[in-house]
Image (spheres, grey):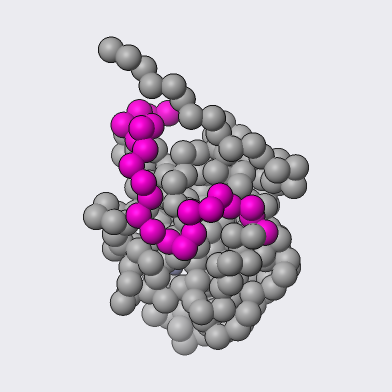
Amino acid sequence: MTTPATPALPAVPERSRRYLPDADGWVPAARRVPSPNFDERPPGTPVDLVVLHNISLPPGQFGSGDIEAFFQNRLDPDKHPFFATIHQVEVSAHFLVTRQGELVQFVPCTQRAWHAGQSDFFGRPRCNDFSIGIEIEGCDDLPFTPAQYDTVAALVPALLAAYPVRAIAGHSDIAPGRKTDPGPHFDWARFATEASLAPGMLPYRCPPADASADASGD
Ligand SMILES: [Zn+2]
């Protein structure tokens, strides 16, 4: 049996080095806010997709701390009418990028966060199994901040270097008709430029078959 050569991982830009996850999947530069809403990825599942989202709690408001509360199952149902409808929902994401560009991490990248819900990536269901979820604090109606582009564009190359990521999708790409985030204000071209993404990674498309795809596991 022959072993295919391991493809070289992309070089990590200087500004992305502090966002490289450690062996346990935690990014040292992130503020750690552990969520209980995660479990194991299925055995032998490579992390090959990054999913971008937006979120704001209460809707359209920023900086309340309620996103962190939501992902830690401690949202106050009496604080806002919307919270009463969602406070028992158990969800999470690996990361949140605040309006100020601060990176918060809830779940280690090695584990399965609960961010995508019912979803499909070119015929592969349950995108949580194989993806990393990044929430960008925002909504469908307002631009994101320059600081948020800076952080997302520095984080994603680190994830590309650490894991065999082959594609970057919006939540709306993998759950069309059900989800709209990150929404029309997320500037994919700006993100691709700032992150120095390889041509072909965006716009969202089916990733080419990759000889390394059957080398599952680590
Ligand atoms: Zn989403």
Q: Residue 142 placed where, x, y %?
A: 60, 83
Q: Residue 65 placed where, x, y %?
A: 63, 70
Indicate the quadrant where residue 5 lies. top left
Camera sees residue 198: yes
| Quadrant of image for the C terminus | top left
Q: Name, please, the residue furthest toward the top.
A: 1
- Does 25 appear above or below 132? above
| Residue at (37% x, 38% y) in the render | 210
Is 215 one of the magenta-colored residues?
yes
Q: Main secondary structure of the magenta part?
A: loop
Q: Which region shows up in magenta?
A: 194-218
Q: Residue 50 placed where, x, y %?
A: 47, 53
| Residue at (38% x, 59% y) in the render | 205
Observer-nearest residue: 2 or 126? Answer: 2
| Residue at (24% x, 55% y) in the render | 123
| Residue at (56% x, 56% y) in the render | 95
Q: Residue 89 placed where, x, y %?
A: 38, 67
